[in-house]
Image (cartoon, helix red, strand yellow):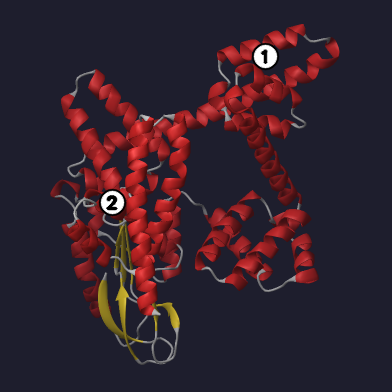
Amino acid sequence: MAKIQTTCPNCSQPLVADIHQLVDINQDPRLKELLLTGGLNIAQCPACGFQGQLPVPLVYHDHEKELLLTFTPPDPNKTMEEKESALAPLLKQVTDNLAPEDRKGYLFQPQAMLTMNNLVKNVLLADGITEEMMQKQQEQMRLLEKFLTVDGDQLVKEVKENQENIDRDFFRLFAEIAQRVVASRDEDSISRIQNIQDVLMSETEIGQSIKSEAEEYQAATQSLEGLGQNLTRASLLELILDAPTMERVKAYASLVRPAMDYEFFTLFTEKIEDADAAERKEMVERRNLLLKVTQEIDKELDERVASARQLIDKILESESVEEALIQHINAVDQLFIQVLSTELKAAQESDDKGREEKINELLQVVQKLTSPPELEVIETLLSVSEDEEKFNSVLKELDDQLMQRVIDYLTSIISNYDEQIASGELGSPEEMKANQAKLKEVFNSLLRKSMEQKMTAG
C-alpha cells in the first residue's frame, strides 16, 4: 500500500489516499477479494464527501495461472508512453518478487484491459467462472438491488413475480450480502435485509424448501442432543425409524456420519429382516437413502482430504513455508488442520525427520497467521501475569476497542471451561481448574482497567 496525491473524481480537489496498484495474489491473496468485491482503492474526499474507487493504474498477477493483467484509466492528456511508464515499475516489482526459475514468458506479454470491469471479468474467467455464470449473478444482483428499494406489499409482489429467478445460487448471494450488512451494524439496513429474508422464505418455493431443511436440521440436532450420553447405534437407528420426514433422515446423516458405520447398517438390515411386510418397504427406502447420502458425504470428504494433502505437499516443497501458506491462507480450515496432524503422525511413525520438521514448522506458521489478535493478547498477558510491571505495560498498549474484544473473548473461553473440566477431554480437571483460575485473574484485571478508562473518559 502507498499514499498518493491525486484529485477527487467529483470536485477535482487535491486528495491524499492509500491505494494498491499491484494486486499480486502470490504476495497478498486478500487483495484479490477486495478487487472482486469492489473494495479496492476506495477513498473519501474531505472537500465534497465523495466516496468511491479511485481510477489509478493497476497490475494484477497470478503466477499459478500465469495471468498478468494491466489497467490504466482513460486520460486524453497522457500519451501511450506515459501510461506504459506508470505501469513499468509495477511490472518490474512482479518480476522481482519471483525467483529466477519462476520467471516465464507470460511476464513479457501482459494483457491490457480497457476497463476495470473487464479486468475483473478476466480474473473470474481464469477461476473457471463462465460468462453465463457471471451474467446470471449480475441479473440476480440487480434483482436483489430491486428488492432493497421496495417494501411491504410491493416487495411481496416483486418476489412473487420473480420466483423463476430465485434459486439456491440467489440465496447464496443474498447470504453474502446479508453478512456484510450485519457486519456494518447499520440497524436500518439489517432490518431491511431481515424483512427481505422473511418474504423470500415465505413466498418462494425454494425459500420454503430451505426453511424446511433448516427446521429439520435443527430438530435433528435437538433430538441428538437429547440423547446425550445415551447416543448409541441402536438409539440412533430408532431416531431414524421414527423420523417424520426423509429430510430429517438426511439431517441425521449429515450430523453423525461417523456413527453410520458397517455395524450400524448391519443392525439396520437385521431390523428390516425382523419387520413385517407393511413396515419393511419404508425401512428399506430409509436405509437406501442413508447409504446414498453417506456415500455422497464420503466422496466429498475424500476429495477435500486429497486436495488438502496436495496443498500441504506443495507448501512443504516451497522455499518459504510462510510465504506459500500466505498465498493459500483461504484454504486453511479445520479439515486442513486435521489432515496436517495426520501427516505429522505418519511422518513420526515412518521416522521421516525431515518431513516431521517441515510439518511442525507449517503448524507453527498456521497458528501464527490464524490466531486472532485477542488470543495473542491473552497469551501475552498470561505469560507476564506474575510480573505486575510487565502486565500493566501490556494493558497500557490496548486501546478501548481491542480491550473490549479481549474481554468478550475471555468471557467465552472461561464459560466453556466448566464443560471442558467436566468432560476431562483436554487434560486433568485439576490442571484445567488451575488454568481457569489464571484466566479469571487476567479477566478481572482487564475489567478493572476497562472501568478505569471509562471513568477517566467520563
Q: In the picture shown, does residue 77 fall above or below 288? A: below
The answer to the question of whether label 1 and label 2 lie on touching residues, with beta carbons closer than 8 A, is no
Residue at 50% from the left image edge and 64% from the top image edge: 183
Residue at the disc numbered 2: 63
Q: Position of residue 405 (x, y in %)?
A: 40, 60
- Residue type at mark 1? Phe
Whether residue 113 appears in this view of the structure is no
Q: In the picture shown, does residue 208 fall above or below 33? A: above
Q: Position of residue 58 (x, y in %)?
A: 32, 69
Residue at 37% from the left image edge and 66% from the top image edge: 450
Whether residue 446 appears in this view of the structure is yes
SS type, badge 1: helix
SS type, badge 2: loop
Give me the disc on residue 268. 1
- Give the crowd class for mark 2: few <14, some 14-19, many >=20 residues within 10 Å: some
Picture quarter with the N terminus: bottom left
Q: In the picture shown, does residue 362 fall above or below 54? A: above
Picture quarter with the C terminus: bottom left
Residue at 79% from the left image edge and 66% from the top image edge: 157
Residue at 33% from the left image edge and 51% from the top image edge: 441
First in sequence: mark 1 or mark 2? 2
Q: Which residue is the extreme one toward the left?
A: 100
